[in-house]
Amino acid sequence: MPASLNGEHFETVIIGAGMAGLAAGIRLALAGKKVIILERHNASGGLNSFYSQAGRKFDVGLHAMTNYVPKGTKGTPLTKLLRQLRIPYDALDLCPQNGSKIAFPSCELGFTNDFSFLEAEVARVFPNQIDGFRALAEEVRTLDAFNLGAIPTSAREAVQRHIKDPLLEDMVFCPVMYYGSAQEHDMDYGQFAIMFRSLFFEGFARPLEGVRVIIKLLQDKYRSLGGIRKMKCGIQQIKTEGSKVSAIVLDNGDILTAEKIISTAGAVETARLCEDQPTDAEASNIGQLSFTETITALDCQPTDLGWDDTIIFFNTRERFHYGRCEHDLVDPTSGVICFPNNYQYGEGRQLDEGFLRVTAMANHDKWCALDEADYLAKKAYWYDELQKVTLRILPEPKGKNAYPDASAPMPLSASDLLDKHRIASDMFTPRTVRKYTGHLNGAIYGAPNKIKDGRTHLENLYLAGTDQGFLGIVGAMLSGISMANLHALQGS
Amino acid sequence: MTEDQVKQIVIDIIDEIAPDEDTTDLKGDVNLRDQMDLDSMDFLDIVMELRKQHGIEVPEEDYPKLASLDSCGEYLTPKFNAK
């Protein structure tokens, strides 16, 4: 790679080394194109990354990789993307989940990677809704959700055509929204279908070593094909001439040119980089939803305490509310609990330490307004609050580790138990998300209105990733692949 | 180059881009899509490899001519021989 990029010309420049950018890069490098990926940070992965603290690795993003199918399953997104990236299935080390659940105040629905399990659960808890649920599933199965020209329609309305009990409706929406909706209260039916399939028809899996396995695979593949990647390389401005990008100005002032640009920076974020757009362009399409997550390391396996679920999507209100957290720093009334240990890693394979991750909605502006001392104090406060909520959702601790010693007359309270087994903890907030993804408002899932064909106001600038609208990690990679194919490879 | 040799080149490319598909006993006159799980993204890869490995260009409007092994042989052989 040249020491300076100043004056260099590329066939395609990709902005962002997240899952979508890396996947797009692999496609272009496979085709023999001169391609470069520019990444503002010193780590790849974007929204899905990891960091080390005191020698311990923490994952960000990736509770579970959705879209899991067993090896050899044909025609599914995972299979398609592995083929497109020429990555062998086994390289991902995908280990399926144990089982997950949706926990609401009055009832629970379990689900696994076998859809018939969820069907049976719905039939058990909502016997008069099972026909509607099956009809919905059938409609979702056959919907052309990847149609890039589809007009967005309301998923709430579509679901209500089949499911008449609002409790079941909310329980279906809770995991689907938490794992990918950038829109408040409702979502596009096409996006709903993509998520529903990826969660319930396909399923959850995880590599033992977490998200870094996937990032490393993508990076190594890209590098082996001769793709160039430049880290710590932010973009100051996209220069325009008429309806085209004419050049890209880097933070260090270097100027490079490209025939095509694929940006994974976000729809609004990309528009605002363009010379011909005002700095407040597309304000109405800024995402409103941000999250916080607590991560707790334990000196034992979660199953030793009787916590066997892989993921629990919970809601403690009467109606599930998926919307901006308005009044406080965190909305602890719904969220996601994840035990990364609870996957079928195979005989003798397990994470050395136990992990408990809890995600909830959080208010970006309020977190960002805190001064440093207050920020740390509020993190400590909300860490405790979220642990309290979590312990009310989790089953009562059981097993030998639930007792301080064999002679103790009483088991420890759940909260004392967690204190006893905790060896480390951390928490990220919307401020962290904003810093590492560059998403305005720290909006994890980006803009509410997706741009499915990836086109922008400039004819050689395209979007991929979160704001193109294929969701989840597999979706992000497929987005990079599809946009590279459509705009930079097809017919060229 | 004969049509059979060109067909074998196409089979080799499919083996490379879709290693999980069985390419033994493919029928020449039946659409590849009906015999294997290939989609438009896979056909893009066949075109990509023809260009990369053999310098053969297939314009987008001619993609339908790659539908079956026989039509591949018919369409691509003159291109290989014209090189």
Image (cartoon, grey):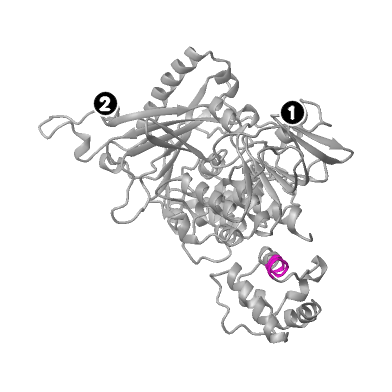
Mark 1 crowd level (few <14, some 14–19, many ≥20, 10 Å Cα):
few
How far apart are the two marked residues, 1 and 2, measured between alpha carbons?
46 Å
Which residue in the rendered view is the most extreme toward the left? Answer: A407
Mark 1 chain: A
Magenta segment, prevailing SS (helix, strand or loop): helix
Q: Mark 2 falls on what kind of element?
A: helix
Horizontal and vertical percent for residue A67?
Answer: 52, 54
Asked if the magenta segment contains residue B51, the reply would be: yes
Magenta-highlighted residues: B46-53
Determine whether, in the image, residue A276 is placed left or right of residue A126. Answer: right
Q: Upstream in the sequence, badge 1 or badge 2?
A: 1
Name which quarter of the figure residue B17 lies in.
bottom right
Name which quarter of the figure residue A457 lies in.
top right
Residue at the spot 74% in from the left edge and 51% down from the top edge: A150
Asked if the magenta segment contains residue A160, the reply would be: no
Residue at the spot 64% in from the left edge and 81% down from the top edge: B8
Q: Nearer the viewer, residue A452 or A110?
A: A452
The reply to whether the C-beta atoms of the residues labelled 1 and 2 are less than 8 Å apart is no
Q: Nearer the viewer, residue A9 or A18?
A: A9
Determine if residue A317 is in view. no
Which residue has dot 1 on it? Answer: A283
